[in-house]
Image (tube, helix red, strand yellow):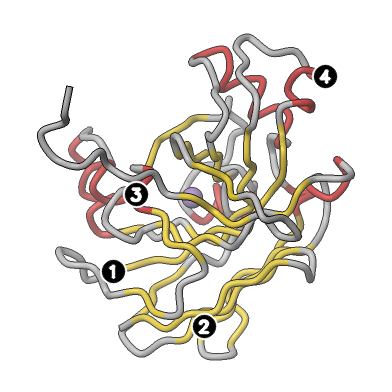
Amino acid sequence: MTTLFPKPEHSTVPILGSELTFPVRRVYCVGRNYAAHANEMGHSEREAPFFFTKPADSLVINPKTIPYPSMTEELHHEVELVIAINQELSDADESEAEACIYGYALGIDLTKRDLQAAAKDQGRPWDLAKGFDQSAPISPILPLDNLADIERGPISLSVNDKLRQQGDLADMIWSSVEIVEELSRHITLKPGDLIFTGTPSGVGSIERGDRVVANLNQTLDLNFIIE
Ligand code: MN
């Protein structure tokens, strides 16, 4: 059978040091996973991790520019560790969750904060505040040698050379392994799934012409201009 139109192409993320690429299946994101960010968003109690998604084709690999999106006047940056899953698993225990994390990347969960706030007020879904075109800039994936590399280490984002977000992976309320365990109780994770693990405090607005530079563990970075 011939398809009505060409099959949609999956996003693929380069893997550092490899000729292989990482084909993306789905993109999950964790909300409020650093205490200081939860506080700045008006929440103070530890809660179970909660999840939302972005379309897989909202990823942009190592972009040089990102267009300022339509339908917002308050575009926010959220710098995040992203973990890459390469095994199927459901209802995982800790060791199974560890084993399925192939590698990690640096990502930015771009957010239309004004739309998100309105959706929250109205008890409506956030989807279009989070999952718009090019809303998920991401670095290449670094294969994980040592679990410690995603358990601690500096993560930061600056805008026009001014530091906005500076955190440490050790301050994540739910670790990457715990996030995988919890998500795998809800859905069957599959190879190609990416998980944005939440942002430290300091989220804020970006405007046309701003240069955004982000860094994780002094090994992964992103550097682009909002157009
Ligand atoms: Mn986020």
Tell me what residue is drawn at x 16 percent, y 31 percent. Answer: 3
Q: Amino acid at mark 3?
A: Asp
Q: Which mark is residue 95?
A: 4
Residue 191 place in picture, x, y as percent: 57, 29
Q: Earlier in the sequence, mark 2 or mark 4?
A: 4
Q: Amino acid at mark 1?
A: Glu
Q: Is residue 79 left or right of residue 142?
A: left
Label 3, on which residue?
57
Residue 136 place in picture, x, y as percent: 43, 57
Mark nearer the viewer, 2 or 1: 2
Q: Earlier in the sequence, mark 2 or mark 1?
A: 1
Q: Spatial distance from mark 4 to mark 1, Cα to Cα?
A: 41 Å
Label 2, on which residue?
159
Q: Is residue 124 left or right of residue 77?
A: left
Q: Is residue 68 left or right of residue 70?
A: right
Q: Is residue 46 above or below residue 127?
A: above
Residue 146 place in picture, x, y as percent: 89, 44
Front one among 161 and 225: 225
Q: Earlier in the sequence, mark 4 or mark 3?
A: 3
Mark nearer the viewer, 4 or 3: 3
Q: Spatial distance from mark 2 to mark 4, Cα to Cα?
A: 38 Å
